[in-house]
Image (spheres, grey):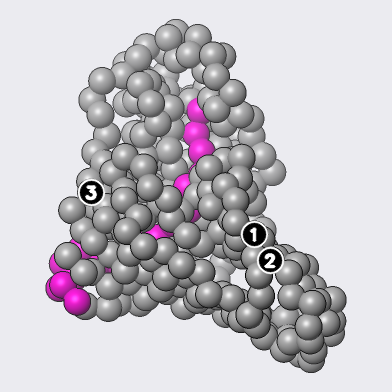
């Protein structure tokens, strides 16, 4: 078990006065089996009132507007979270049982349809079919598909952007965790395994000392349904979800869980800034 303190600061600077901005932030974690939120708080500057709610996918959202002139919007999320390993279960269901089970709930049906970001190139879909065809059950297939995608795509920053699709990343065979997650999700869905996008944080240093603060960043991984329940896996690092992963949000793809989204009235052009610091406290 790890107790982690996460400070995530992000926002925009503008080339002049923005006269108004309307925003949503998805930066605070939630409690569930394997993760306990001890404390969490969102600081927004300029100071304003905000409305908090949980969206359709179960993610905490802060919705706010700033109606006074400002040249910078800054949001800082401070969280303390206890996380423990969540290894993949070994029990599973058959392919026929999975096909029947996915028709039973909205949650599984909604995570079978491809989106613009997850739609896999034919080469990726063919790879997934080949793996599924020789796999004894959906759990084994999902595991092997994620490993294959992680092996095929090199983690390289700057090649893709937040709006890049799985197909874009596959063309380069390079991308970041967002791209690798989209490719894995598209591959899983293409063979009938419901899959969803998870956003959060990964402590980058497995052997960090207690009290040590390290530079981190937002991270993305996948969850699939292969019975019983949903199971997480990190295809970028080819590891199971453990006590260094802090979950923030789930959705069909990145567009359902961006840390910060909004519009503003003011001068053309804005610059995004992001810093993440993670401290192991226990």
| Residue position marked by numbered label 1 in the rendering | 51
Near mark 1 (Cα within 10 A), the count class, few <14, some 14-19 or many ≥20, is few
Marking on residue 165? none
252 horizontally vs 129: left or right: right
Residue 64 is tagged as: 2
Decide: few, some or many residues near mark 3? Use Cα within 10 Å; few <14, some 14-19, many ≥20. Answer: some
Residue at the spot of label 3: 84
Instruction: Look at the picture and state if 253 lies above or below 110.
Output: below
| Dot 2 and dot 1 residues touching (CB under 8 Å) | yes
Residue 203 placement (x, y as % from top left): 30, 64
Horizontally, residue 46 falls left or right of residue 39, namely right
Can residue 240 be spotted in the picture? Answer: no
Q: Residues within 10 Å of mark 2 (few under 14, many from 20)?
A: some
The picture places residue 134, in percent across and down from the top left corner, at 36, 19
Instruction: Establish if 249 lies above or below 14.
Output: above
Nearer to us of marks 3 and 1 is: 1
Asked which quadrant contains residue 146, the reply is: top left
Q: CA distance from mark 3 to mark 2?
A: 33 Å
Mark 1 lies on a secondary structure that is: strand
Question: In front: 147, or 13?
Answer: 13
Q: Position of residue 31 (x, y in %)?
A: 38, 47
Q: Residue at x 44, y 43 (%)?
A: 222
């Amino acid at each position: 078990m790890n107790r982690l303190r996460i400070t995530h600061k992000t926002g925009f600077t503008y080339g002049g006065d923005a006269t108004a901005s309307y925003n949503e932030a998805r930066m605070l974690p939630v409690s569930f089996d394997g993760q306990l939120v001890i404390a969490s708080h969102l600081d927004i500057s300029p100071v304003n009132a905000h409305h908090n709610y949980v969206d359709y996918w179960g993610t905490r959202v802060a919705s706010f507007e700033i109606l006074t002139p400002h040249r910078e919007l800054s949001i800082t999320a401070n969280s303390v979270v206890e996380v423990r390993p969540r290894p993949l279960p070994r029990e599973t269901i058959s392919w026929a049982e999975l096909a029947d089970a996915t028709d039973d709930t909205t949650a599984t049906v909604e995570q079978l349809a491809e989106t613009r970001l997850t739609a896999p190139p034919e080469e990726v879909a063919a790879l997934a079919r080949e793996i599924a065809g020789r796999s004894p059950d959906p759990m084994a297939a999902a595991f092997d598909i994620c490993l294959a995608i992680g092996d095929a795509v090199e983690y390289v920053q700057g090649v893709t952007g937040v709006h890049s699709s799985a197909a874009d990343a596959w063309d380069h065979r390079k991308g970041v965790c967002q791209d690798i997650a989209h490719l894995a999700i598209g591959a899983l869905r293409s063979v009938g395994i419901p899959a969803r996008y998870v956003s959060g944080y990964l402590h980058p240093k497995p052997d960090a000392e207690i009290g040590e603060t390290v530079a981190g960043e937002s991270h993305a991984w996948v969850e699939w349904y292969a019975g019983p329940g949903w199971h997480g896996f990190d295809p970028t690092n080819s590891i199971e979800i453990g006590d260094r992963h802090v979950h923030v949000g789930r959705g069909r793809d990145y567009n359902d869980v961006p840390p910060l989204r909004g519009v503003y009235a003011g001068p053309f052009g804005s610059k995004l800034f992001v810093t993440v610091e993670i401290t192991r406290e226990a």
